[in-house]
Amino acid sequence: MTAMLKLPSVRPSVLNLGVVAICFAASPCLAANETRLASPDGAVQFKVFLDKGRLHFAIASPKQSIVEPSPMRFTVDSVDLADGVEVGNLETYQVYETYPWYGVHGQATNHCFGATFPVKHAKSGTSYKLEVRIFNDAAAYRFIVPGGNAPRVPDEASTFVIPAGSTVWYHDLEGHYEGVHVKRGIAEVKSGDWAAPPLTFKLPGGTGYATITESALMNYSGLALQADGKRGFQVRLGHSHPPSHPFLLRYGTNEAARLAVPATVTGTITTPWRVVTWSTIYVRPLTGSFSRRG
């Protein structure tokens, strides 16, 4: 069954973008089904679904998977809030805005469809939101957990499963941002390999390129990615990163040990956007604002 939902407009006097298709296996509730949020041009879909009680996601076009079905893992105080969950009825929205920009184009366009899923972790009773946005050339998700005055420790280990036959370019954390990139087939990437964002990969069959990175990093640990040896790269927050050689030279082992302690967040926990961008042209200038605004 396919449900057609009209999205509320952020600027109704300007927008006349019609209807976006959100496809449900049975109903808008994810109790045993899946939701697919289409990009504004309808070419790509972001799928959210449950598998054995765990949140998963996937990104695909009719011709090619961009990110294959991948498990989400998000913990607060060591409780995995993405496992054993109930997901309620989503709320949808759209964003369309333009603004001046310095670079290869003078005007940036921020155009996406979005959805917010209310999620409840059954065992702990914790309620939070999973927010998803999809552009014509990117998709992103983040978690938002309301809270009070007590500090809490968030952590993540969500996976991005890259399609078989892809080629990846990445560098580890040893040289900080001056690391030397390596080029490998995704099947050749070893478990435990580190990748500093953005991770770039070429999709099989010459269908395009994609990157994995983050956006709107505020009051939260930065990410790196670590390979699982099964075509997946997992999110790893700052406390788990091995210190780079330049960092140790400048700050020493005591400071590295201090930063190996997980960071706490007081109040609402809002993760950065976990972002995937794609293009059929390698160095195409990005026009979406997901990399520039929160």
Image (spheres, helix red, strand yellow):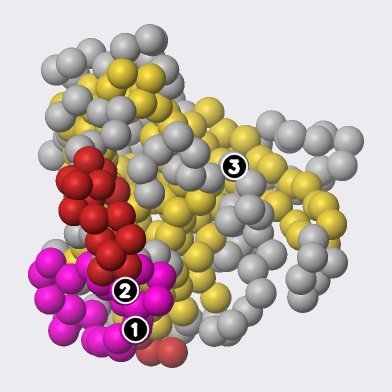
Which residue corresponds to mark 3? 294
Q: Quadrant of residue 281?
A: bottom right
Q: For this rendering, which residue is in front, 291 or 209?
A: 291
Report the residue that reaches farthest toward the right. Answer: 13
Measured Cα–Cα span from mark 3 to mark 1 = 30 Å
Task: Using a 10 Å C-alpha cutoff, classify the residue at mark 3 as few (fewer than 14 neighbours), some (14 to 19) or many (20 or more).
Answer: few
- Can you say whether 91 is above or below 18 in the image? above
Task: Using a 10 Å C-alpha cutoff, classify the residue at mark 2 as few (fewer than 14 neighbours), some (14 to 19) or many (20 or more).
Answer: some
Q: Which amino acid lies under the numbered mark 2 shown in the image of this protein?
A: Gly
Measured Cα–Cα span from mark 3 to mark 2 = 29 Å
Q: Which amino acid lies under the numbered mark 1 shown in the image of this protein?
A: Val
Which residue corresponds to mark 1? 180
Q: Mark 1 or mark 2, which has the lower sequence index?
A: 2
Q: What number is the disc on residue 175?
A: 2
Is residue 186 inside the magenta stretch? yes
- Residue in the picture at 64% in, 68% down: 286
Q: Quadrant of residue 39?
A: bottom right
The stretch of residues the image draws in magenta is 169-194
In the image, taking residue 141 as reference, residue 67 lies left or right, namely left
Q: What number is the disc on residue 111?
A: none
- Residue in the picture at 40% in, 27% down: 269
Q: For this rendering, which residue is in front, 271 or 131?
A: 271
- The spot of residue 228 in percent (x, y) is 14, 64
Is residue 43 inside the magenta stretch? no
Asked if the residue under mark 2 is in contact with the one under mark 3, i.e. CB atoms within 8 Å, the reply is no
Asked if the residue under mark 2 is in contact with the one under mark 1, i.e. CB atoms within 8 Å, the reply is yes
What kind of element bears circle 2?
Answer: loop
